[in-house]
Amino acid sequence: METTQSNLFELQIDELSNGYLKETAKWAKFLSILGFIGCGLIVLIGLGMTFLFSSFNSPELTGSVGMYSSGLSLVYIALAALYFFPCLYLYRFSTGMQAALRAGEPVQLQTSFRNLKSCFRFIGILTIILMSIYLLAIVGVAIIGFASF
Protein backbone atom coordinates (compact mmCIF):
# COMPACT_ATOMS: atom_id res chain seq x y z
CA MET A 1 0.00 0.00 0.00
CA GLU A 2 1.47 3.29 -1.06
CA THR A 3 1.19 6.30 1.19
CA THR A 4 1.66 9.82 0.08
CA GLN A 5 3.42 12.13 2.44
CA SER A 6 3.58 15.87 2.24
CA ASN A 7 6.12 17.91 4.10
CA LEU A 8 4.05 20.38 6.08
CA PHE A 9 7.09 22.25 7.33
CA GLU A 10 7.52 23.60 3.83
CA LEU A 11 4.09 25.14 4.21
CA GLN A 12 4.48 28.84 4.87
CA ILE A 13 2.08 30.83 7.00
CA ASP A 14 1.30 34.10 5.27
CA GLU A 15 0.40 37.31 7.11
CA LEU A 16 -3.35 36.77 6.77
CA SER A 17 -3.17 33.23 8.19
CA ASN A 18 -0.78 34.46 10.86
CA GLY A 19 -3.34 37.07 11.89
CA TYR A 20 -6.13 34.49 11.96
CA LEU A 21 -4.06 32.17 14.13
CA LYS A 22 -3.11 35.00 16.51
CA GLU A 23 -6.73 36.01 16.92
CA THR A 24 -7.81 32.38 17.33
CA ALA A 25 -5.16 31.90 20.03
CA LYS A 26 -6.38 34.99 21.89
CA TRP A 27 -9.99 33.82 21.85
CA ALA A 28 -8.93 30.30 22.84
CA LYS A 29 -7.01 31.69 25.81
CA PHE A 30 -10.00 33.84 26.82
CA LEU A 31 -12.42 30.89 26.59
CA SER A 32 -10.08 28.54 28.43
CA ILE A 33 -9.61 30.99 31.30
CA LEU A 34 -13.39 31.40 31.52
CA GLY A 35 -13.61 27.61 31.51
CA PHE A 36 -11.18 27.35 34.43
CA ILE A 37 -13.24 29.93 36.32
CA GLY A 38 -16.37 27.92 35.50
CA CYS A 39 -14.74 24.74 36.82
CA GLY A 40 -13.93 26.50 40.07
CA LEU A 41 -17.49 27.80 40.38
CA ILE A 42 -18.93 24.36 39.73
CA VAL A 43 -16.74 22.89 42.48
CA LEU A 44 -17.73 25.69 44.87
CA ILE A 45 -21.42 25.15 44.09
CA GLY A 46 -21.04 21.42 44.67
CA LEU A 47 -19.31 21.95 48.01
CA GLY A 48 -21.74 24.71 48.93
CA MET A 49 -24.69 22.37 48.41
CA THR A 50 -23.16 19.91 50.85
CA PHE A 51 -22.81 22.56 53.52
CA LEU A 52 -26.21 24.08 52.78
CA PHE A 53 -28.08 20.79 52.97
CA SER A 54 -26.14 19.63 56.02
CA SER A 55 -27.33 22.74 57.86
CA PHE A 56 -30.90 21.40 57.94
CA ASN A 57 -31.47 20.26 61.50
CA SER A 58 -34.62 18.24 60.97
CA PRO A 59 -33.93 14.73 62.32
CA GLU A 60 -36.27 13.01 59.85
CA LEU A 61 -34.58 14.68 56.85
CA THR A 62 -30.93 14.67 57.95
CA GLY A 63 -30.05 11.21 56.64
CA SER A 64 -31.70 11.41 53.23
CA VAL A 65 -30.79 15.05 52.56
CA GLY A 66 -27.19 14.45 53.59
CA MET A 67 -26.96 11.42 51.33
CA TYR A 68 -28.44 13.24 48.33
CA SER A 69 -26.37 16.37 48.86
CA SER A 70 -23.15 14.36 49.08
CA GLY A 71 -24.04 12.46 45.93
CA LEU A 72 -25.00 15.63 44.11
CA SER A 73 -21.77 17.31 45.24
CA LEU A 74 -19.76 14.41 43.85
CA VAL A 75 -21.61 14.72 40.55
CA TYR A 76 -20.80 18.44 40.39
CA ILE A 77 -17.13 17.82 41.19
CA ALA A 78 -16.97 15.06 38.56
CA LEU A 79 -18.53 17.40 35.99
CA ALA A 80 -15.98 20.08 36.89
CA ALA A 81 -13.18 17.54 36.40
CA LEU A 82 -14.58 16.57 32.99
CA TYR A 83 -14.85 20.23 32.01
CA PHE A 84 -11.31 20.95 33.23
CA PHE A 85 -9.48 18.84 30.64
CA PRO A 86 -10.84 20.47 27.46
CA CYS A 87 -10.09 23.85 29.04
CA LEU A 88 -6.54 22.73 29.80
CA TYR A 89 -5.98 21.51 26.22
CA LEU A 90 -7.43 24.73 24.86
CA TYR A 91 -5.19 26.82 27.13
CA ARG A 92 -2.13 24.83 26.07
CA PHE A 93 -3.11 25.36 22.44
CA SER A 94 -3.46 29.10 22.88
CA THR A 95 -0.22 29.65 24.76
CA GLY A 96 1.67 27.33 22.43
CA MET A 97 0.27 29.00 19.32
CA GLN A 98 1.13 32.46 20.61
CA ALA A 99 4.69 31.33 21.40
CA ALA A 100 5.07 29.56 18.06
CA LEU A 101 3.93 32.59 16.08
CA ARG A 102 6.22 34.92 18.02
CA ALA A 103 9.30 32.72 17.68
CA GLY A 104 8.53 31.05 14.34
CA GLU A 105 9.08 27.67 16.00
CA PRO A 106 7.65 24.75 13.98
CA VAL A 107 7.91 22.25 16.87
CA GLN A 108 5.94 24.58 19.14
CA LEU A 109 3.36 24.99 16.37
CA GLN A 110 3.06 21.23 16.10
CA THR A 111 2.64 20.85 19.87
CA SER A 112 0.01 23.56 19.85
CA PHE A 113 -2.02 21.84 17.14
CA ARG A 114 -1.65 18.51 19.00
CA ASN A 115 -3.29 20.12 22.04
CA LEU A 116 -6.10 21.49 19.87
CA LYS A 117 -6.62 17.99 18.44
CA SER A 118 -6.72 16.56 21.98
CA CYS A 119 -9.29 19.17 22.99
CA PHE A 120 -11.60 18.30 20.11
CA ARG A 121 -11.05 14.55 20.56
CA PHE A 122 -11.96 14.80 24.25
CA ILE A 123 -15.08 16.84 23.50
CA GLY A 124 -16.04 14.47 20.67
CA ILE A 125 -15.70 11.33 22.80
CA LEU A 126 -17.60 12.97 25.64
CA THR A 127 -20.35 14.00 23.21
CA ILE A 128 -20.65 10.42 21.91
CA ILE A 129 -20.87 9.10 25.47
CA LEU A 130 -23.53 11.65 26.45
CA MET A 131 -25.56 11.03 23.30
CA SER A 132 -25.46 7.29 24.05
CA ILE A 133 -26.68 7.93 27.59
CA TYR A 134 -29.49 10.14 26.25
CA LEU A 135 -30.47 7.48 23.72
CA LEU A 136 -30.55 4.80 26.41
CA ALA A 137 -32.64 7.08 28.64
CA ILE A 138 -35.11 7.75 25.81
CA VAL A 139 -35.40 4.05 25.03
CA GLY A 140 -35.81 3.27 28.75
CA VAL A 141 -38.54 5.87 29.17
CA ALA A 142 -40.29 4.61 26.03
CA ILE A 143 -40.19 1.02 27.29
CA ILE A 144 -41.54 2.05 30.69
CA GLY A 145 -44.20 4.20 29.01
CA PHE A 146 -45.37 1.39 26.74
CA ALA A 147 -45.28 -1.13 29.57
CA SER A 148 -47.69 0.99 31.59
CA PHE A 149 -50.43 0.64 28.96
Image: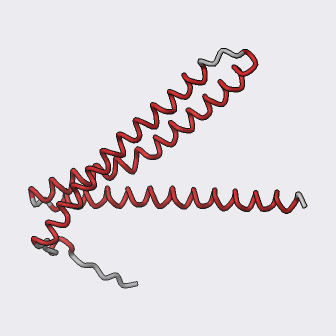
The residue lying at 42 percent from left, 36 percent from top is 41
Q: Position of residue 80 (x, y in %)?
A: 46, 41
Between residue 60 and residue 86, name the one nearer to us. Answer: 60
Q: Is residue 59 left or right of residue 39?
A: right
Compared with 78, 128 (above or below) is: below
Q: Nearer the viewer, residue 116 or 36?
A: 36
Q: Where is 87 relative to 63, above or below?
A: below
Judged left or right of residue 68, residue 112 is left
What residue appears at the point 22 percent right and 57 percent down from the top-left corner?
Answer: 25
Residue 118 location in percent, x, y? 37, 57
Determine which quarter of the picture holds residue 24: bottom left
Left/right of residue 109 with respect to residue 142 in the rendered view:
left
Q: Position of residue 22 (x, y in %)?
A: 17, 60
Residue 117 falls left or right of residue 16: right
At which x and y percent is residue 68? 66, 31
User: From what the image shows, is residue 23 above or below residue 56?
Assistant: below
Farthest residue in the right direction?
149
Q: Quadrant of the C terminus?
A: bottom right
Residue displayed at 35% across by 61% down: 117
Kindly identify the residue that appears in the image at 11 percent across and 73 percent down: 14
